Image: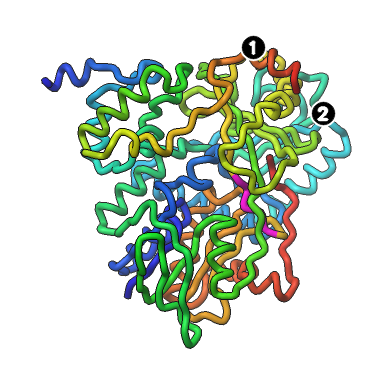
Amino acid sequence: MGEEVKKLTIICRCNDVTLEDIVSAVNAGIDNFEVLRKYLRIGFGPCQGRSCIVLAARIYSRLTGVKLNEALSDYKVRPPIVPVPARVLLAGG
Amino acid sequence: MRVVIVGGGISGLFTAYELWKRGIRDIVVLEERYLGSGGSTRNIGCFRSSFTSPEHVLLMKRSIELWLKYRDELNLQLKQSGYLWIARRLETLDVFKKLAAFHGEYGVPTRVVDPDKAEQIQPGLNRKAVVGALFDPTAGRMPVLENIVKLYLKLKSLRVVFHFYTKVLRLHASNYRVKSATTSRGVVDGDVFVVAAGGRGTRELLSSINVEFPVVDETRHPVITEPYTEVIRPALIIDWDTPGAPYVTQTEHGGLIFARNISDAHEAPITSHRIDVIGTTIKPIIELLPALRYVNILRYWIGYYETTLDHHPVYGPVQPYENLFVAAGFSGHGLMMGPVTGELIADWVLNGKPSIPLAENLTIERFKTGKLVKELAIVG
């Protein structure tokens, strides 16, 4: 894949993380998917990883040879899953 | 000389960095899970030296100096935008005046401000709820995940060896020297051992060589929102007069983080679901900043305050062993103390004593002698 395409290919749409960002981070020496995810903030946005996490993990797996299930073994889904207005949660507090 | 560091978090990393700078080349870091997977990547990234014991104030002053030095050296990110401690009750202002005078003695320029000034520092404050505030302009915040990765990549380039997913199960000693560590992936020999494995991890490991370390991992539940443009001006706003000292900070990426000390089952699993804590956590802050009722909550996560009996860390040599050192029990302040932790542990390992003499008060001996250090300003 050409360098221009890597720059234009968005993997995490919430935080504008591109394919090139992931490749560069792996080349820089980041050797764990959970650390990579935290460094680039993949899955930290409003989608909570629903649209990007498997995509990013597959790219990481392909680049490093680490199995997909191993790459995702430290990933945790955290409630409330979808963005909830503070005033709604206040009622329960 | 080989130094084995147990714990791949901020304390272990800065200890490795400081030892490398002083000429140690054979450094092995053993981490139970992944980089910074304990408290180091679960905290909110804030720092201050406005504590209430001389030990904490002086150590954190030095730590902030070192953070600023490393910002340039390692291209880290951090910003000194201040802490604003909100008083709701008039009596609290007297406490704040005493604290400001105490901080002044140690060269930390905190000051008491009236509600007008507090509102200038943080626009939108609810004047009806606030009688004044204490402002510490030297405090600040940082993007934690970015900084710890940069430090890690630097250490890798210096050939510090890391073994992840390697849990240290036992230490083995003879003639008052630790000889080796049995891990989940084999035995590691070393000349010096430094244990910086958080609260429970350090406690369990030290118990394998009959050293008692009284510490409890207290559960915390920080809550983060969707990203917004800058709404929280200081690094941290703390509601001093509400139980559990709720606070709010805004990350470099725009998310607002709320947290509060809510009594909970200690050492609860890191994945336990407590959605009920969100409302209790955010409610007092929304009283102070009513516009925040319109933010959207994204998620919460769990971290620990590795809390000691006197809310101070445990540093330095572990008697009766000659080559065993500890850095743990930070009681919520491990990230901010990271650089001074590295400096002090390297001092003890290489010179036998710390460069800041007051740090001698923080050895594990104090739990035997009963000379605990008093600290009042523990937040969230």
Amino acid marked by disc 1: Tyr
Q: Nearer the viewer, residue B65 or A27?
A: A27
Give the number of the disc on residue B294.
1
Q: Which residue is mark 2?
A: B131
Residue B125 seen in render: no
Rate crowding at label 1 as few (under 14), some (14 to 19) or many (20 or more) other CA atoms within 10 Å: few
Rendered image quadrant of residue B24: bottom left
- Dot 2 crowding, Cα within 10 Å, few <14, some 14–19, many 20+: some
Q: Is residue B238 above or below residue B341?
A: above
Magenta-highlighted residues: B304-308
* Camera-nearest label, 1 or 2: 1
**Figure quadrant of the C terminus of chain B:** top right
**Residue B316 vs residue A83, the one in the foreground:** A83
> Quick one: which residue is furthest to the bottom in this view?
B175
Chain of residue at mark 2: B
Q: Secondary structure at mark 2?
A: loop
Q: Can residue A53 be seen by looking at this rendering?
A: yes
Q: Amino acid at mark 2?
A: Val
For residue B174, the mark is: none
Q: Main secondary structure of the magenta part?
A: strand
